[in-house]
Image: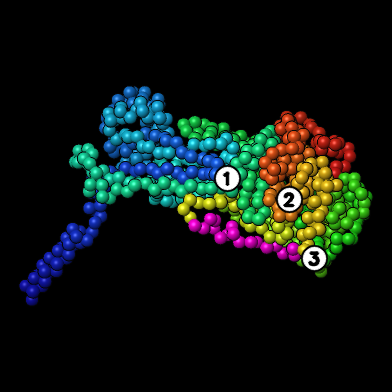
């Protein structure tokens, strides 16, 4: 029995040992892979990043060669650090820090020592690098900007960080990746696919040729070119008009939702974030917390929309059947409400007014009456407020637009829950007068410039819009753009109800608040806006000069452009916003400027003095261009 047991143990042990050896030598390739990794060096061949063009085929962004000095820490042999640092024009301390970081990242994988050498620097170093084992030069491509504008939507590329590498195995230390704008949103399309060459090494770690005669090598696939919806000439012109001003301009083609211009001011030359000086330049831009050139005001700034919001209240009132186009309301310098006779001020204009002249003359009293009727139509103000909110949501307000850009803000449209929280004592006890500022686009309402431009495009289309987008075509794709941007979004407002609003906006240019910025030969529909502007100075809420807001579309029928202009501290709607919008429309439709008087005025006027007031540390008056606030009640147009 003991012999049988001993024999069984020996037999079973032999079988297990044989099976383990079979697994290790035949089935398990992990050690073979490790061996190959030790004997094979991967050399990456980086593809050209895709070019970027405007809608008319003008080249906006191409590529230029760049060279990085790389290191594989475990392959480094003792070398003359003084000579090496002299070649690279860096200190020994800096080199030591770079090598230490590289070793922490990975002893086996390459890391950057010096990025983005110029052609002349590369030519000088190329022959000398053979003296320094473990170091080599990696060729890449950097962006070469053909324009000095559009940085906010073009974006920039920068070196990947540890998080990028951990999230996506495609990236290695030193790789470049889109960080903002189109470069970020379309990173996978633009970057292409890296090629790989496998180089075999001998036991002394010397290169001895291509592994398996190069049969496993791959060639790089260049990135795909993008054609944007942007009109480069219109974009450039808009940025010129916004010099020494802050704000945003969005121009959209209503029939397609294509973004024609996406202007944020102040902006910066995109070439500042390319090359060896990129880090220093980015630091300067980042720490400019006053002008904020890296902040895209066209997509991210949330402003009170002011009087252009009245067009939406008119549409909702017509849809809710609380007013018709013939009914008039009197205006005695404003709208009085509440038991204490509070006043919502207004400017001088004919009275009484019905809807069309009410829009054309931007009557606050008219829209205060209309708004209250919408809210008071239902059994409770909560129900009326939610109904009002839902109509506005159908225009894409109070939510992210869903554009093909990586940044944006939702703005804010209040609902009954908001006011229930705000007026919880006595519980839920509030009426339409508590929210009357919504009638003129002030109070809790906020929109981004792109949202207001999209509202204008929706009015131009009489009730529908395509989600705004900036890419028109991707090289090699049969479908020009995703279905999302080819699907109509329809509002809750019947198409017939848009006609009186369009007539009112047309009247604004012909006899109303925008009569001074007419463009000969173009039927333009527009709406001025002036929004109150506050900030905190030493912890106290203080009023600044009003924002200038203007929206327009043209021509009146079969419109080709819809535009929204926000100029911070710009006094009133027609002063800056109206002039800029009219010039942009003429530039797009005619291709030339005939209202040179408007152009000369805008180009020669600056708002830098207004922006400096809160920083002066001295008391300052608020100027709306007509009178000093506090002495006479200001109009809100």
The secondary structure type at the circle numbered 1 is loop
**The residue positioned farthest toward the bottom in the image shown:** 1
Image-based side of 256 in relation to 3, left or right: right
Left or right of residue 145, residue 337 in this image: right
Displayed quadrant of residue 69: top left
Vertical relation: 93 (above or below) 416: above
User: Residue 393 placed where, x, y %?
Assistant: 69, 60
3D distance between C-alphas at marks 3 and 2:
29 Å
**Depth order, front residue of 410/572:** 572
Asked if residue 625 can be seen in this view, the reply is: yes
Residue at position x 69%, y 36% in the image: 241
Determine whether, in the image, residue 364 is placed left or right of residue 558. Answer: right
In this rendering, the label closer to the viewer, 1 or 3: 1
Mark 1 packing: few (<14 Cα in 10 Å), some, or many (20+)?
A: few
Query: Considering only order in the chain, which callout, 2 or 1, is on the residue closer to the N terminus?
Result: 1
- Neighbor class of circle 3 (other Cα within 10 Å; few <14, some 14-19, many 20+) is some
Does residue 181 appear to the left or right of 466 in the view shown? left
What residue would you read off at disc 3?
320
Q: What residue would you read off at disc 2?
A: 555
Q: Is residue 80 magenta?
A: no
Instruction: Name the residue beneath numbered marker 1.
Output: 56
Circles 3 and 2: CB distance less than 8 Å?
A: no
Q: Are discs 1 and 2 less than 8 Å apart at CB?
A: no
Within the magenta stretch, is there residue 481?
yes
State the SS at label 2: loop
Between residues 130 and 122, which one lies in front from this camera angle?
122
Q: Which residues are magenta?
A: 478-495
**Residue 339: x, y in percent?**
91, 56
The mark found on residue 521 in the picture is: none
Residue 340 appearing in the image: no
């Amino acid at each position: 029995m003991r012999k049988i047991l001993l024999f069984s143990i020996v037999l079973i042990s032999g079988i297990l040992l044989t099976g383990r050896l079979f697994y290790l030598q035949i089935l398990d390739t992990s050690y073979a892979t490790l061996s190959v990794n030790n004997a094979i060096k991967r050399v990456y061949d980086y593809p050209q990043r895709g070019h970027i063009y405007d809608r008319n085929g003008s080249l906006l962004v191409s590529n230029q060669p760049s060279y990085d000095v790389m290191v594989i820490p475990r392959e480094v042999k003792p070398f003359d650090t003084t000579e090496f640092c002299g070649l690279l024009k860096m200190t020994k301390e800096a080199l030591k820090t770079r090598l230490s970081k590289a070793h922490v990242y990975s002893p086996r994988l390459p890391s950057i020592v010096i990025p983005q050498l110029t052609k002349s620097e590369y030519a000088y170093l190329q022959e000398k690098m053979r003296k320094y084992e473990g170091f080599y030069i990696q060729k890449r491509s950097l962006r070469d900007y053909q324009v000095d504008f559009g940085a906010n939507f073009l974006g920039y590329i920068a070196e990947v960080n540890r998080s990028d590498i951990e999230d996506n195995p495609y990236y290695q230390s030193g790789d470049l990746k889109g960080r903002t704008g189109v470069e970020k949103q379309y990173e996978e399309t633009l970057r292409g696919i890296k090629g790989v060459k496998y180089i075999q090494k001998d036991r002394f770690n010397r290169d001895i040729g291509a592994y398996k005669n190069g049969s496993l090598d791959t060639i790089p696939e260049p990135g795909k070119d993008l054609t944007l919806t942007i009109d480069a000439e219109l974009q450039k012109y808009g940025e010129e008009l916004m010099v020494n001003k802050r704000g945003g301009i969005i121009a959209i083609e209503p029939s397609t939702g294509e973004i024609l211009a996406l202007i944020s001011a102040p902006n910066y030359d995109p070439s500042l974030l390319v090359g060896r000086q990129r880090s220093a330049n980015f630091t300067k831009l980042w720490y400019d917390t006053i002008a904020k050139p890296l902040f895209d005001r066209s997509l991210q700034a949330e402003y009170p929309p002011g009087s252009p919001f009245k067009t939406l209240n008119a549409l909702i009132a017509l849809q809710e059947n609380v007013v018709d186009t013939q009914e008039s309301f009197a205006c005695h310098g404003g709208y009085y409400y509440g038991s204490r006779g509070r006043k919502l001020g207004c400017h001088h204009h004919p009275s009484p007014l019905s809807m069309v002249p009410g829009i054309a003359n931007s009557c606050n009293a008219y829209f205060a009456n209309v708004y209250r009727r919408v809210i008071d139509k239902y059994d409770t103000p909560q129900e009326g407020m939610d109904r009002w909110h839902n109509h506005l949501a159908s225009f894409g307000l109070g939510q992210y637009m869903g554009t093909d850009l990586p940044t944006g803000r939702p703005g804010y449209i209040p609902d009954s829950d908001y006011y229930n929280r705000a007026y919880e004592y006595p519980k839920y006890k509030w009426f339409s007068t508590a929210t009357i500022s919504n009638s003129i686009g002030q109070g809790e309402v906020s929109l981004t410039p792109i949202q207001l431009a999209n509202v204008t495009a929706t009015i131009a289309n009489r009730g529908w819009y395509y989600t705004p987008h900036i890419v028109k075509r991707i090289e090699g794709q049969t479908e020009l753009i995703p279905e999302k941007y080819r699907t109509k979004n329809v509002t809750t407002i019947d198409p017939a109800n848009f006609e009186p609003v369009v007539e009112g906006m047309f009247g604004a240019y012909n006899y109303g608040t925008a009569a001074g910025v007419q463009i000969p030969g173009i039927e333009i529909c527009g709406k001025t806006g002036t929004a109150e502007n506050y900030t905190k100075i030493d912890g106290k809420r203080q009023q600044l000069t009003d924002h200038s807001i203007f929206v327009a579309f043209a021509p009146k029928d079969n419109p080709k452009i819809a535009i929204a202009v926000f100029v911070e501290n710009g006094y009133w709607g027609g002063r800056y916003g109206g002039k800029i919008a009219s010039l942009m429309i003429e530039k797009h439709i005619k291709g030339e400027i005939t209202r040179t008087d408007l152009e000369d005025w805008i180009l020669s006027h600056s708002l830098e003095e207004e922006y400096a007031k809160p920083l002066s540390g001295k008391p300052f008056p608020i100027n709306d261009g007509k009178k000093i606030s506090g002495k006479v009640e200001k109009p809100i147009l």
